[in-house]
Amino acid sequence: MDKIRNDWTKEEISAIYNRPVLELIFEAAHTHREYHDSREVQVCTLLSVKTGGCPEDCAYCPQAARYHTDVEVHKLMDVEEVLESAREAKESGSTRFCMGAAWREVRDNRDFDKVLDMVKGVNEMGMEVCCTLGMLTEEQAEKLKSAGLYAYNHNLDTSEEFYSDIISTRGYSDRLETLDNVRKAKISMCSGGIIGMGESEGDRIGMLHTLATLPEHPESVPVNALVPVEGTPLEDQEKVSVWEMVRMIATARLIMPKAMVRLSAGRVRMNTEEQALCFLAGANSIFAGDKLLTTPNPEYKSDEEMFQVLNLKPRKAFKEELPISDPA
């Protein structure tokens, strides 16, 4: 196996991204087989535990309070209600359960205490438990780790250069600081981005470059295609082609070979053949369930049928769990 590299240049990543697409898929599929079981795909479930009313202005997000969308604002769910959803997800084949709250940042209050109880409960079910709660301090990350949190999702969304076109209520450095706090707490890092927001090819490469040159690669890299929502500034964006998704997934696989590359938002607009290309290119995780936070997602039954057609099997939780080492 090749040595894992953290010194990629943008030029090298660009050369990989722009290879003839069939050659790119072939190379990524080969690397995927070196580091992973190519028949395994992890099934994850994402639940919005607190919906809408967010003070941020992320241009893609229907949960921002300032946009007029159909999203209804809901306060934080009760712990038992969330644990019941986790049990249902586990019975449906999910091995990773992610809880999302539409917060700008975590605050040390009763709501955070409830989230810690949710984390404990899901962890006790033997599932990988993940949260995405906005910005996080080092102390809050430590509390989540102590409660049993396995992974924390905090996407970069796009490149540093394009970031301010999409979000003005926080900076790129804030994102990186949260990722650093996650690492310090020895929590598995989940960080990726969204394509189809009007960014350039260079922005896509820039985002991958930032992820691939972190002191340690994220264990999990979600690749999202924008799902335009009426009422948001990006409501009229065109659908991303499957080839753009394939290029992102294959490039992520080649430069971060150990990572779980997650085929995330936008999957509802893909047929089985398009999703199969993404798996061939190195994706080895999907989000299941009828919604991803507030946007539509394929139902469990259609995913079950796809797994049968493609002879895929769900990956077990905590498989080949590697200790998160201290940066040298």
Image (tube, rainbow, N blue to C red):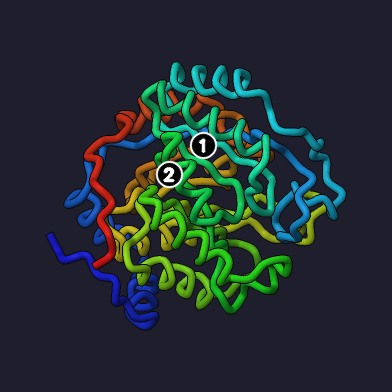
**Which residue is at a point 37% across and 68% down the rendered structure image?**
214
- Kind of residue at badge 1: Cys
Work out which quarter of the rendered image holds the C terminus and state it.
bottom left
Q: Are marks 2 and 1 in contact (CB under 8 Å)?
A: yes
Q: What element carries label 2?
A: strand
> To which quarter of the image does residue 225 belong?
bottom right
- Kind of residue at badge 2: Ala
Task: Write down the residue under mark 2.
Answer: 151
- The percent position of residue 190, horizontal first and vertical second, equals 44, 51
Which label belongs to residue 138?
Answer: none
Task: Write down the residue under mark 1.
Answer: 98
Q: Is mark 1 on a helix, strand or loop?
A: strand
**Which residue is at a point 27% across and 59% down the rendered structure image?**
326
**Which residue is at a point 31% across and 61% down the rendered structure image?**
256
Judge whether 293 appears above or below 2 on screen.
above
Residue 318 seen in render: yes
The mark lying in front, picked from 2 and 1, is 2
- The percent position of residue 160, horizontal first and vertical second, equals 56, 75
**Depth check, front residue: 302 or 145:** 145
**Which residue is at a point 52% across and 41% down the rendered structure image?**
131
Judge whether 217 appears above or below 275 on screen.
below
